[in-house]
Image (tube, grey):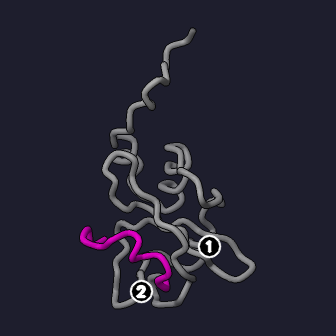
Amino acid sequence: MQSDIDPRGLIGRKAFDRDGTKIGTVDEVYLDDATGQPEWAAVRTGLFSRDAFVPLEPSEVVGEGLRVPYSREVIKGAPDLGVGRHLSPEQELRLYHHYGMDVASARERPHPPPDEGDDPRPE
């Protein structure tokens, strides 16, 4: 995805599958914990449907829309992880598996340290 795009500018854009079929509207954008870069978009797939997570890389902004290089069926079949909260590393791995993306590179990404005051050692 173009790195100069403001993630807030993606919200409300129409999302299209690889064939140019509208799949919904970008509802939320999730940033990578380590880099702060936009990594996933939650696309509202219909009035009574749910949000489906789509990867922003290798998606691209085309005109006023977001083109996702996957079929509508693959996108609608993405794991239902709920929106409005942080994606855990395990949830991200499920998404990587679903989209057939390189899981090895996802596991090698650095994760943020625990919050100050959180002692990971047992008591």
Query: Quick check: 12 above or below 106?
Result: below
Where residue 10 sits in the image (x, y, percent)? 42, 76
Residue 21 vs residue 52, the one in the foreground: 52
Q: Quadrant of the N terminus?
A: bottom left
Q: Does residue 16 appear in this view?
A: no
Q: Does residue 91 appear in this view?
A: yes
Residue lying furthest right:
48
Counting other residues with Cα less than 10 Å from the Cα at mark 1, is it few (<14), some (14-19), or many (20 or more)? some
Residue found at x 65% / y 59%? 82
Is residue 97 on the magenta stretch? no
Residue lying furthest left:
4
Counting other residues with Cα less than 10 Å from the Cα at mark 2, is it few (<14), some (14-19), or many (20 or more)? some
Q: Identify the element where label 2 is drawn.
A: strand
Bounds of the magenta span? 1-16
Residue found at x 34% / y 53%? 36
Numbered badge on residue 65:
2
Q: Quickly name the residue at label 1.
A: 76
Residues at marks 1 and 2, CA–CA distance in whole angstroms = 18 Å
Residue 81: name its quadrant.
bottom right
Residue 8: name its quadrant.
bottom left
Q: Earlier in the sequence, mark 1 or mark 2?
A: 2
Residue lying furthest top:
123
